[in-house]
Amino acid sequence: MSDEAKILTEVRGRTLLITINRPEARNAVNGAVASGIEAAIDELEGNDELWTGVLTGNGPVFSAGADLKAINSGEAAALNTQRGGFGGFVQRERTKPVIAALNGPALAGGCELAIACDLIVAPEGGLIGIPEVKRSLIALAGGLVRLPRLLGKNAALELAMTGEPFPVERMYQLGLVNRVVPADQVLSEALALADKINEAAPLAVRASRQAILQTDGMSDSDAFAKCGELVGPVFRSEDFAEGPLAFIEKRAPQWKAK
C-alpha cells in the first residue's frame, strides 16, 4: 500500500500482518482506519493461503481508541462499519485466529480492538484500559461486554468505573494477556505464536476456536452437542486423513485446509 494508507497489510508466510498506520494520531480510529481494518479482515478470510492474522500499530501506541476530532467533526458514524462495528473489527464474524501485538498502550477503543482478537502479546510495562468515564463516555465497543467475561466482574468494574488502566503484567496474571515480552520483541513473538498455530491443522484450529467461543455459558450437554456439530466437517476433511498418516510415516503433515 501507499505511504498514505492508514492500514498496511503484509503477508508473512501463512499470516497476514495488519498494521494501523496513524502514528501522528496515536493510531486513533477514524473512518479510514475502520474501513481499512475491515478490508484487511476480508483479505484474511477470503484468502485460503492465509490461516492467521496479527493486528499491530505503527509507532509507540497500539491505539488510543476513537478519534475524538473525527467525532467532534460529525464523523462518528464512519468509525463503525456495518459488518464489523467499531474499527471495522470488534463485532466482525470471522473464522481465522487474530493475535493482537500491542506495540504500546491499548486504551479505550484500542483496548476494545485488542480484546476482540483471540490472543494478546504485550510489552513489558505496557498499559491496557478503558478510560472513557474520565471523559463522560462509555466503553460501548466491547469493553463492558468482554472484559467481565475475560477478567471477572470485579476487575472489569474497577477498570470501567475508575478509568485507570492496568499494567499488562496484571492482565497476564488475570489471563487476558498471553505473553509479556520486551517491547522490541512484541511483533516477533506474535508472529512466532501465529506460526505455532499455523503448524496445526487449520480446519481443526478454526473448529476448536469456534467451540470455545460458541459454548461459553452453555450447559455441559448443550456444549457437547455444539462441539459435535463443529467437528463433523473436520472429520470429513482431507486433513483428517493426513494427520494420522503423517504421524505413522514420521514426517511433518502437509495441511491443505480442506
Image (cartoon, rainbow, N blue to C red):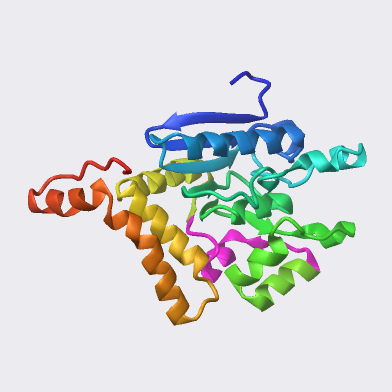
Q: Which x, y percent locates residue 7?
A: 63, 31
Residue at 68%, 49% in the rendered image: 110
Bounds of the magenta segment: 162-179
Give yes or no for residue 170 being in the magenta stretch: yes
Residue at 44%, 69% in the rendered image: 226
Q: Return the residue nearer the eye: 181 or 98.
A: 98
Please state, as top left, top right, bottom left or bottom right, where the C terminus lies in the image.
Answer: top left
Q: Which x, y percent locates residue 132?
A: 81, 58
Q: Which x, y percent locates residue 234?
A: 32, 55
Res. 72 visible in picture: yes
Give yes or no for residue 165 being in the magenta stretch: yes
Q: Return the residue nearer the eye: 160 or 9.
A: 9
Q: Which x, y percent locates residue 149?
A: 60, 71
Residue at 55%, 37% in the rendered image: 42
Q: Return the residue nearer the eye: 183 or 192.
A: 192
Q: Is residue 51 left or right of residue 27?
A: left
Q: Given the current orientation, which residue lies at the most extreme left position?
A: 249
Q: Is residue 42 left or right of residue 4?
A: left
Q: Is residue 129 above or below residue 110?
A: below
